[in-house]
């Protein structure tokens, strides 16, 4: 089945109910709005987001003049499409790039979300754009995570900095970023430790690493399959450690779409990239309009 089939079909019901109407009014839009609300809740979009969304759609659908040439059902599709794009941040949010010197990208995330894989994907993506990359392994708790990054580095063909005897993530990060600068890398991707749950130690460690390397980007990697929970995780990390954006992984396994639709509205942080599979090339930049297009089918 195509991704977001459920959402797509449920939304379809909403427009159908306006077929044959001559205009959208307060009465005939009630049922379609109820369908939209239900569709978004089933997609696991968080309730406050759904409420605001439906309210905005109602105001726009009733309030504005019908666009020339659009029938009421088409008009509602257009309003919903515009609002979906706005919900996800309107414009794509490209990765920061320093005009001069090495751009520092800090990667954070809970264990198992696909953070380490994403470091490799990002390195591979940047290299395909002609940028040189160094990765830094800062997970002092799981040697396996360092090995995993090392292996990814070999596959991508980029150096991976680590200090196997150090137990100080900030120091590793600092030295790693210095090594990347010395090598005149365009980008350095710093992979931090993932934990099973959000805890204060993790947040403190991230704050320390941030202080040590002053990243241009602090990106939180979250799993799309966790739906609206992903948005809450972004929000809570951002309250502790200032983020510049989020990355959604496992979008290929997400049939509902709640994470993609909730992250920006809940946290105010843009989704910059999405992971769409296990291969290193399974990475896409996030475009709100394309995502809305996929949802609306
Ligand atoms: P980490 O603990 O956050 O570093 O997670 P890993 O990078 O080790 O990934 C955990 C698992 O998720 C691995 O089996 C990955 O192959 C898988 N994975 C990562 N990204 C994606 C994705 O975009 N799609 C799918 N289907 N699987 C992914």
Image (cartoon, rainbow, N blue to C red):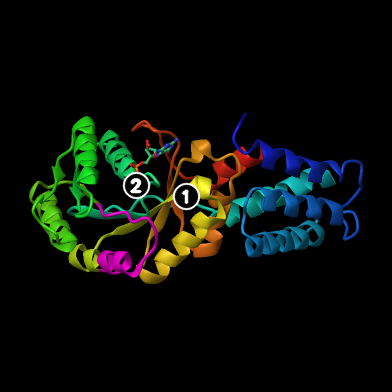
Image position of 268 (left or right of 196): right
Is 194 inside the magenta-drawn segment?
A: yes
Pick the front one: 96 or 139: 139
Question: Looking at the image, can residue 162 be seen?
Answer: yes
Give the residue at x 68% y 49%. Answer: 42
Residue 115: assigned label: 2
The kind of secondary structure element at disc 2 is: helix
Quarter of the picture for ligand 1? top left
Give the residue at x 63% y 41%. Answer: 295
**Tags 1 and 2 touching, CB below 8 Å:** no
Q: Give the range drawn in magenta.
A: 191-207
- If you read the primary sequence from the N terminus, does the residue marked by circle 1 or circle 2 appear first? 1
Residue 55, image quadrant: bottom right
Q: In this view, does 64 lie above or below 279?
A: below
Label 2 crowd bin: few (<14), some (14–19), many (20+), radius 10 Å: many
Image position of 122 (left or right of 20): left
Give the residue at x 65% y 51%. Answer: 82
- Residue carrying label 1: 92
Quadrant for the N terminus in the image: top right
Q: In this view, does 296 lie above or below 279?
A: below
> Where's residue 58, x and y in %?
77, 60
Label 1 crowd bin: few (<14), some (14–19), many (20+), radius 10 Å: some
Pick the front one: 51 or 216: 51
């Amino acid at each position: 089945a195509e991704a977001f089939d459920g959402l797509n079909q449920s939304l379809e019901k909403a427009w159908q109910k306006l077929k044959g109407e001559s205009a959208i009014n307060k009465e005939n839009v009630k049922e379609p709005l109820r369908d939209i609300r239900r569709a978004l809740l089933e997609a696991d979009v968080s309730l406050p987001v759904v409420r605001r969304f439906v309210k905005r759609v109602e105001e726009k659908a009733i309030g504005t003049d019908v666009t020339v040439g659009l029938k009421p059902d088409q008009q509602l599709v257009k309003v919903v499409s515009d609002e979906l794009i706005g919900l996800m941040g309107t414009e794509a949010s490209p990765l920061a790039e320093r005009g001069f010197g090495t751009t520092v990208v800090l990667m954070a995330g809970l264990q198992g979300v696909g953070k380490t894989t994403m470091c490799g994907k990002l390195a591979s993506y940047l290299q395909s754009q002609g940028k040189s990359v160094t990765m830094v392994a800062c997970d002092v708790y799981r040697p396996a995570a360092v090995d995993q990054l090392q292996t990814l580095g070999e596959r991508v063909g980029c150096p991976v900095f680590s200090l196997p005897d150090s137990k100080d993530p900030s120091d590793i990060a600092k030295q790693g970023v210095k090594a990347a600068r010395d090598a005149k890398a365009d980008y350095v991707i710093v992979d931090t430790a993932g934990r099973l749950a959000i805890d204060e130690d993790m947040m403190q460690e991230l704050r320390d690493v941030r202080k040590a390397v002053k990243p241009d980007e602090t990106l939180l990697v979250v799993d799309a399959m966790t739906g609206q929970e992903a948005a809450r995780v972004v929000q809570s990390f951002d309250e502790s450690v200032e983020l510049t954006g989020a990355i959604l992984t496992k979008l290929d396994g997400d049939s509902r779409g709640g994470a993609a639709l909730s992250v920006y509205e809940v946290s105010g942080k843009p989704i910059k990239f999405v992971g769409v599979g296990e291969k290193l090339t399974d990475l896409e930049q996030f475009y709100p309009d394309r995502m809305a297009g996929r949802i609306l089918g």
